[in-house]
Image (cartoon, rainbow, N blue to C red):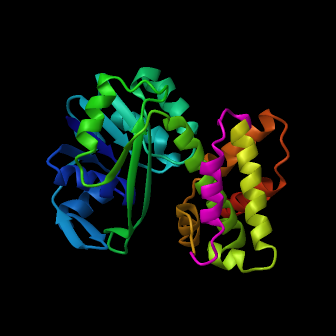
């Protein structure tokens, strides 16, 4: 299977590296700066087990040739429009596109551009970031990759994808209910991002502050009400596990959006929080805490 990994940041770099190490034909589609970094130093993974360096196959948009069987999109959501332009020449009649992005807006965007039959569901769970020298740092052993047909029909095309991905040294989950997994991932990451960005701290700091637990539970409840109104079929055991994870004061947690914010980077405010507010408005839901978070993030973006 010919695989194009759109992006070689923490997520794309890690999972693409694991696919390449498993012997798959993987090409990383990257921008000029990342291209030069990877050409000079290779793709460096720092994991709990040690440091590994790969010499990856690289391409830039101008040099893409031929169609790919699977395109895995791993960029930040605000870069999606440009990435769609970049990958368009690589999309053929049999190509499948698996986005691993935050939120859900990107699914409809990709379907409108390339067709509903080409887009499958995907998400990952990994604690990873880029280091000062652009190395991929896996901070904990967690490295789960979920995927499946958006309508639950995991046909022969999806079976082929599964056969490739499950052999790539990561914890893979071939789901026949990927939409619920996507809703629940959004519930987790948007609650985490909202409270960390608003309070400017990790969950341990928030939960041990006066009113912190009420803040977290209030944000969680607002988000759950929005995604339920939008079609999420609530799985009580799953949502309880998410709230329990977020509410553990012994485990300090932060989101990638919070880490980007503290470093002065662009953030996925519209895709993670803003889209929830648009969906809440559609159902006339009151979301005062999410509104406060959104204002906070907009001011940050104005001041960048």
> To which quarter of the image does residue 86 belong?
top left
> To which quarter of the image does residue 235 belong?
top right
Quick check: is 237 in the magenta stretch? yes
Q: Position of residue 177 (x, y in %)?
A: 50, 34
Q: Nearer the viewer, residue 205 or 246?
A: 246
Quick check: is 41 in the magenta stretch? no
Query: Which residue does the image show at 39% across and 53% down from the upper left?
Result: 144
Q: Is residue 252 left or right of residue 117?
A: right
Q: Nearer the viewer, residue 46 or 203?
A: 203
Q: Nearer the viewer, residue 58 or 222?
A: 222
Q: Position of residue 133 (x, y in %)?
A: 32, 73
Q: Is residue 57 left or right of residue 247?
A: left
Against 42, residue 233 (above or below) is above
Q: Position of residue 95 (x, y in %)?
A: 30, 27
Q: Is residue 302 left or right of residue 94?
A: right
Q: Position of residue 239 (x, y in %)?
A: 64, 51
**Numbered circles on residues, count:** 0
Residue 117 visible: yes
Against 218, residue 281 (above or below) is above
Query: Which residue does the image show at 51% across and 24% down from the upper left?
Result: 112
Residue segment shown in magenta: 229-251
Q: Nearer the viewer, residue 154 or 282?
A: 154
Query: Which residue does the image show at 71% across and 72% down from the upper left?
Result: 199
- For the C terminus, the image quarter is bottom right
């Amino acid at each position: 299977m010919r695989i194009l990994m759109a992006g070689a940041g923490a997520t794309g770099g890690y999972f693409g590296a694991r696919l390449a190490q498993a012997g798959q034909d993987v090409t990383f589609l990257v921008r000029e700066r990342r291209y030069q970094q990877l050409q000079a130093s290779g793709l460096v993974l720092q994991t709990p087990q040690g440091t590994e360096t790969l010499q990856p196959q690289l391409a830039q948009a101008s040099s893409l040739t031929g169609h790919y069987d699977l395109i895995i999109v791993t960029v930040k959501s605000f870069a999606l429009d440009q990435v769609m332009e970049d990958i368009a020449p690589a999309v053929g009649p049999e190509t499948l596109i698996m986005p691993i992005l935050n939120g859900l807006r990107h699914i409809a965007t990709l379907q409108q551009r390339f067709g509903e039959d080409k887009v499958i569901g995907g998400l990952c769970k990994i604690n990873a970031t880029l280091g000062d020298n652009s190395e991929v740092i896996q901070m904990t052993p967690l490295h789960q990759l979920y995927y499946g047909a958006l309508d639950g029909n995991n046909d022969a095309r999806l079976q082929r994808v599964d056969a490739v991905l499950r052999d790539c040294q990561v914890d893979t989950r071939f789901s026949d209910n990927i939409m619920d997994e996507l809703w629940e991932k959004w519930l987790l990451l948007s609650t985490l991002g909202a409270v960390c960005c608003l309070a400017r701290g990790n969950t341990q700091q928030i939960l041990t502050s006066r009113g912190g637990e009420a803040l977290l539970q209030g944000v969680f409840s607002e988000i759950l009400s929005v995604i339920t109104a939008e079609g999420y079929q609530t799985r009580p055991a799953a949502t309880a596990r998410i709230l329990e994870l977020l509410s553990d004061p012994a485990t300090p947690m932060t989101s990638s959006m919070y880490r980007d914010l503290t470093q002065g980077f662009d953030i996925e405010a519209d895709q993670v929080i803003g889209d929830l507010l648009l969906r809440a408005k559609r159902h006339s839901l009151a979301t005062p805490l999410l509104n406060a978070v959104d204002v906070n993030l907009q001011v940050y973006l104005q001041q960048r």
